[in-house]
Amino acid sequence: MKIEQKTLLQSWRTELMILFQAHYVRSIAIRRLNYLLGVPCILITMLVASYIFFTITHNPDFWVKMMAGMLLLLGAILASLQTFLKYSEQAENHRNASARYQSLHHSIDQLLAFPPDREAELAAWCDKLRDRWDELNLEAPNVNKDEGNPPSSYTSQAPIRYAEQPSVKMENATAAEPTPEKTAKQTKTDKEE
């Protein structure tokens, strides 16, 4: 596999990672909105239903009846918003898109770990991947790619390093890591102090 081909696959891998993370984050945000509408709706309707059963034999004041009516109206509004906005369906669509983008991401990881012997096989595989990706882009809901980018200070894990990466990148990556000699020297100076 040539350096240009590997660079292209790694850029695709990065873009797919951003997409699957963005869809996952969006799925969680929408699910929270669904709960934000659903839970108060349930609580309000339970409260009003309890009030109605409690006051069947009593004649409550006018303002108590108005408060119950307003709460009932608020519960109806929340229920209609939840039905109209279809948050649960949207969350499921984003979750499915995230899983499918992640599958493409893992396919590239597998290809980078076990590259094909001939370039024709690689070209056919890349064409197949692009077709699947294009199909997924048409089916997936819209998402802001910035949602999939972690903050610059966030590092969940070290990037995967493949054996055939250019040595310049590997040297830069290992230069920042402490060597056992440096660690031993630091420990020695800490003990002396």
Image (tube, grey):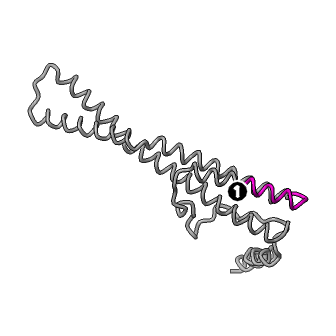
Quarter of the image that includes the N terminus: bottom right
Q: Is the magenta stretch mostly helix, strand or loop?
A: helix
Residue receiving disc 1: 130
Which residue is rendered at x = 59% and y = 48% of the image?
A: 97
Percent coordinates x, y for residue 38 in the rendering: 38, 39
- 10 Å neighbourhood of mark 1: few (<14), some, or many (≥20)? some
Question: Magenta span has 51?
Answer: no
Percent coordinates x, y for residue 48 in the rendering: 24, 31
Q: Specify whether 121 is left or right of 153.
A: right
- Would you place residue 121 above or below residue 166 in this image? above
Between residue 144 and residue 51, name the one nearer to us. 144
Tell me the SS state at disc 1.
helix
Percent coordinates x, y for residue 3 in the rendering: 81, 71
* Quarter-of-image position of residue 167: bottom right
Q: Specify whether 59 is left or right of 93.
A: left
Percent coordinates x, y for residue 80 in the rendering: 33, 38
Instruction: Give, as a three-letter code, the residue at label 1.
Output: Arg
* Residue 27 in sight from this viewpoint: yes
Task: Name the residue furthest top.
Answer: 57
* Quarter-of-image position of residue 15: bottom right
Q: How many marks?
A: 1
Residue range highlighted in magenta: 116-130
Between residue 129 and residue 183, name the one nearer to us. 129
Q: Specify whether 35 is left or right of 9.
A: left
* Quarter-of-image position of residue 7: bottom right
Which residue is rendered at x = 22% and y = 28% of the image?
A: 51
* Residue 38 in sight from this viewpoint: no
Which residue is rendered at x = 70% and y = 64% of the image?
A: 158
- Would you place residue 1 above or below residue 193 in this image? above
Quarter of the image that includes the C terminus: bottom right
Question: Magenta span has 126?
Answer: yes
